[in-house]
Image (cartoon, grey):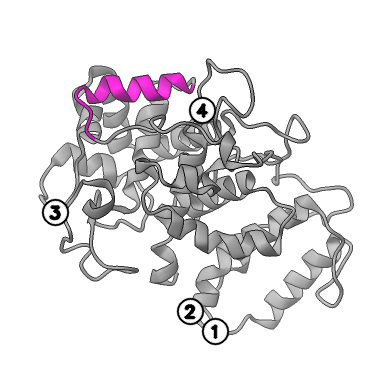
Amino acid sequence: MSPIISACFSPFSETGWHDAGTYNKDIKEWPQRGGANGSLRFEAELKHGANAGLINALKLLQPIKDKYSGVTYADLFQLASATAIEEAGGPKIPMKYGRVDVTGPEQCPEEGRLPDAGPPSPAQHLRDVFYRMGLNDKDIVALSGAHTLGRSRPERSGWGKPETKYTKDGPGAPGGQSWTVQWLKFDNSYFKDIKEKRDADLLVLPTDAALFEDPSFKVYAEKYAADQDAFFKDYAESHAKLSNQGAKFDPPEGFSLDGSPAGAAPEKFEAAKYSSNKRELSDSMKQKIRAEYEGFGGSPDKPLPTNYFLNIMVVIGVLAILSYLAGN
């Protein structure tokens, strides 16, 4: 995996959370209720304090959107987030797609719907924000575990050190303070490191510390620190739940990429199979890719008809093999 691409895991994962995390369950009308609707792409929302720095992730995703214009921003943000988690070593998220985009910046939610890092009452603040979205204490703790990826930069968020021994050499732009030692790997080390508090170079925000201070949160935090499989299971469920919040789907039930569309090849497409550390794809891999494309009614030698399902699958492939392209 290219270290430069690995450095994109955190911002990609954040695009999904920050687009969906504005949902208010008490507002029934779409898009006023917020949620995963692609509004994050507009400058009016990108300027919100909680979204500082996410413009860089959107710049990386825009060429994919330009090439596959039929895929909505709302789906692309959630797709990038779920793919980043999985490619970083995390669980496969049971996603569905078909989200409808808002059409203009006037439909962006007001600032203040995303959580603060250092509120006066951290545990209560987390509950105020997540309960507003219809989530519970388990969701709060599980989703907080995504801080195992990435780092905080004081010039953007006001939190963290300018650099540490873990971030001074990058990858990507050096600096910032990470929550974990291996901040490009998705695992349960976030919970272990908060619990042990042994390293001053690792970041612990007030809202992080609350996970082991609040009695209800602590039950889940202790569980995840001890059992990575339990964390992965709960995280995948909570991530999928969050990614659907407030979204309007077309068709209304959405659709999954885990099944095969009519006329598809019997074997399910798995983008990770096409990621390689080699400088050249093997002949067998090229034949496999060709077989997959022919299964959809086309081939590498002729264009396929426009198909939203196929576009989404191709985008997954693009995100998964960016490391191969960057390495060459």
Looking at the picture, does residue 311 appear above or below residue 20? below
- 3 vs 4, front mark: 4
- Within-10-Å neighbours for mark 2: few <14, some 14–19, many 20+: some
Q: Which residue is mark 1?
A: 279
Q: Which tag, 4 or 2, sits closer to the chain's start? A: 4
Would residue 285 be seen by someone viewing this image from the given angle?
yes
Q: Residue at the location (82% across, 48% down)? A: 261
Q: Which residues are magenta?
A: 118-133
Q: Residue at the location (72% across, 57% down)? A: 69
The type of residue carrying mark 2 is Gly
Q: Which residue is mark 2?
A: 327
The type of residue carrying mark 1 is Arg
Q: Which residue is mark 4?
A: 23
Q: Which residue is mark 3?
A: 201
- 4 vs 2, front mark: 4
- Within-10-Å neighbours for mark 3: few <14, some 14–19, many 20+: some
CA separation in Å, label 4 and label 1: 43 Å
